[in-house]
Image (cartoon, coloured by chain):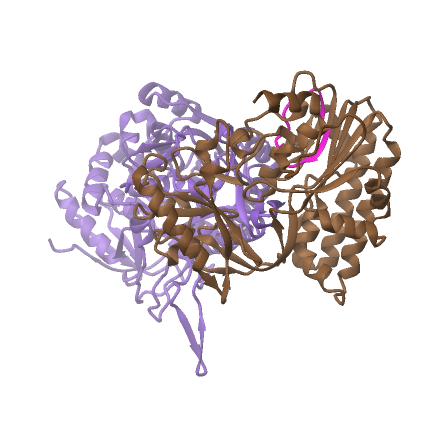
Chain colours: A purple, B brown
Amino acid sequence: MTQSSCHNANQTCWSCPAVEFKGHVDFRACGQAAFRKAAEGQLVVECRRRPDIGYFDPMSITFESCSEWKKTDSGYLLDGMRVLILGMDGYLGWPLALKLAKLGCRVMGIDNLLRRKLVAERGAHSVTEIRTMQERIAAAKEHLGVDIDFREIDLLDRDALFACIREFQPESIVQFAEIPSAPYSMADVDRAVNTIQNNVVGTLGLLFGVRDHAPDASIIKLGTMGEYGSPLTGRPLFEGLFPGDAVLQYQGQEWSLGGELTPRDPVSFYHVSKVQGTFSVYEACKYWWLRSYDVMQGVIYGNYSEELQAHPDLSTRFDIDEWWGTVVNRFVAQAVIGMPLTIYGSGNQRRGYITLRDAMQCITRLIVAPPEPGQYDVVNQVTDVFSVLQIAQMVATLGREFGLDVEVQRIENPRVEAEEHPYEVIHEKLGERFGFASESGFADEVRHLFRVLMQPEHRERILAQKDTLFPKTKWSGEHGKLEVLETWKPVA
Amino acid sequence: MKLFLLGIDGLPRWMWQKFADMGVMPNSAQLLKTGTLVPMKSALPEVSSAAWASIVTGQNSGGHNVFGFTDLMDGSYSLGFTSSRTFRAKPFWAEPDAGPSLIMNVPQTYPAQPLNGMLVSGFVALDLKRAVYPAEQLPWLESIQYSVDADMSLVEKGKGRFVEELRRVMSTRCSALHHHWDRESWQNIMFVFTGTDRLNHYLWEDYEDSTSSFHQTFLDYYHEVDAQIGRILERLDDRTTLAAVSDHGFARQRRSVNLNCVLAEGGFLKLKASARPSCMDILPESTAFAMDPGRIYLHRQGRYPGGTVLADEAESLMQAITSYLLQVSVEGMPISTEVIRGAGVYSGPFSHRAPDLIVMPATDVALSGRMNLSALVEPTLINGRHTYEESSFFVRGEGHGQIPGDMHVENVLEVVLPQKYGRLRRAA
């Protein structure tokens, strides 16, 4: 076999969602069949796309040698792979739809447009103006020459969801349809329940839909690095599962931890919902032979992708308020309008980070390299680890390149979290197994953001929601203004 | 004359006669008095898929392209499974003048192909929906919970549960046979009992051990098969030729030896390290590899993508492999009694796809050809194995052809349909 640079070249048909499991046979006893995936014997499959080749051993054909898998920059891609994106209207969902469609996938998205409503409810809005989904789809056709399907469906409307899965027969399903805000989930009981209901029940329902209507589809489920918390012992944050040589020592005895889920220590009810999602997917893979990559994503930032740049009508949303914005995006926005960058507590909280562009590359590489039936695996999707203080310092420094005199401000921490802690993130799989190589660094991405946000119309849209940037939501449930502890100008 | 061709998979000639004589199969005892029972040789190697293909076409594997349950797709290391789509000779019922035929549970007929009549595939049949022709007969079969095959994994839950499943499947199959038999005046009916083969694979040790708690279970199953044979015999008239055949004999299996491990130990096969070894992992320096049950293929240049064995190296290599396999022992016992050259065995348009060597297993040995080399002697619940010798051929009625002195599976049609296949063979 020839060696290939593509990360998925040597994956076999057993990972391919176009292959249908037919049974196990034992040819030592006349090939009688057992029809459960958990049985033993020679696997027998049939390809839905190439029925002419008959029944075959899925381990004996690779993506590289299959005519249905075409070589692309993101690896071998199942020709016209059907990808269903749940939450396609979101910050991540829309750029992913564009990237996959441009790559040659057949993309369908669903969304209930909840994010637009929740951001508006907060009195905030996307800094970059976003079009309606109908306008976006038309713009994608006009400027990128791609067709994208969309259905306005609530994930909790299982009849509609299942009908969509049944009809579209996705080969990959990306689960982005979750409420992604820690402070929103901590604001009050209604919002906490809404988060849990949407995320936990939505994902659970989805799993039943996949089991019954598209059991060979791979599920790319978005988790978060926040599921792990930040253990004070300094235990490394492994990629979801303990490595094979991990050992627990207790009272003079040793037990292997290899392959077991690592501890989770969520830091908000939103993170609790993500942990529950992790367990639901893990169990579904075990019970029903579904397959999934659980993506523990670091804090995401930026708004650049090749496809997004094709036309302003293709912009993805860009939120900066306390609930819906992420820290880097908010810091750049604060810098642009001369507002001090707000650091919670000491600012020594360390987290993993990744740009939007890199995250899209990672997700794409996972989609084209599906797990095997029954396989559940986890990747830590981060490229850098920074403290909040470091980020503020770097944004302030980069702001000077754009003539901005940036202040930094420490405020009382509204969250319950460790402010001083070790933080060692293991993030090897995406690079080693999926061929991921970062295409965008912190400085370049932040410079791009400054260029975008300093445009007058965007600056105006930041100023119009200035009051939503400063945090108000306290994890304790208490009310009242957070105290400013310190304000300074970082030295160059 | 009409034809009823009854298959009893894996029933050795000697055992059929013995069970008839000792009262286990009383209907058979009556039947065998009315015709001729002779031993028959199976296909080479003695695998059901190839043997049944030979029985229903009158050709050997070189003619029908079924050499085993698996084969590599041409010019690749992709392992395909033989089926009706890779079966390249016409079975007797597909001949233009065959007349309406009812074909039930014949191995190697899945997925069901169109014919003048009705067909329900035998093993390996993975989905009932595609095992039935014409499709309008499917709902009735589903309504009686017809199974395309017994769930063999039940043997892991115990032999009692396993035999219970075999009984259920046989009962349903026989119900289906009689239901469809009544529907039309068929020129040909072919029906195969396949539970016998499964029983022999997993309970042969119990048959040989009269103190086993499953010894009587084994005999009872054959008694039940015989009762079903009796039901069939009641319905046959003098205008029907009745033939009954099995595809191979049976014997005790005490060890399942992975021939690829043996070849690897002999330096003939080298695999790339892989978590899930397959033929794709055969390295170019390999000179030979095996496939189930005892087929050896030289890793020939031009035949396989990484093949390196040149044509003028083949003879000496085959000699070396033959010598090696005849002297090698596993657990102190030989694994082979004879290594046969494929070139001398097969005839027909697909002979070029044949194995180069066929390894005949020694007593107590079954051979496999898995690419997972982790176990030379593979753990298995299987304790009975096929034999090349001593399958069964029985025929009664008027107008059948002469039975050859050295009867093989590919001779069945020339005996039971002499007007057509006797003439063709003579012309050939």
Q: Residue at x 32, y 33 (%)?
A: A71
Measured along the vertical axis of the image, is residue B214 above or below residue A178?
below
- Depth check: give the residue in front, A64 or A475: A64
Is residue A60 found left or right of B32 in the rendered image?
A: left
User: In the displayed image of the protein, which residue is found farthest to the right?
Assistant: B234
Residue B189, position in %: x, y? 76, 29
Looking at the image, the residue that sits furthest to the left is: A492
- Give the image quarter of residue A133: top left
Q: Is residue B298 magenta?
A: no
Q: Work out whether residue A108 or residue A127 is closer to the camera in this orientation and state it.
A: A108
Q: Is residue A135 above or below residue A270?
A: above
Is residue A430 found left or right of B361 in the rendered image?
A: left
Going by the image, does A323 lie left or right of A289?
left
Residue A200, horizontal then vertical, whole percent:
54, 49
| Residue in the image at 30% along x and 45% along y | B284
Q: Main secondary structure of the magenta part?
A: loop
Q: Which residues are magenta?
A: B103-118
Image position, residue B287 (x, y; %): 34, 47
Q: Quadrant of the N terminus of chain A?
A: top left
Q: Percent x, y for residue B159?
A: 71, 58
Can the viewer see residue A241 in this picture? yes
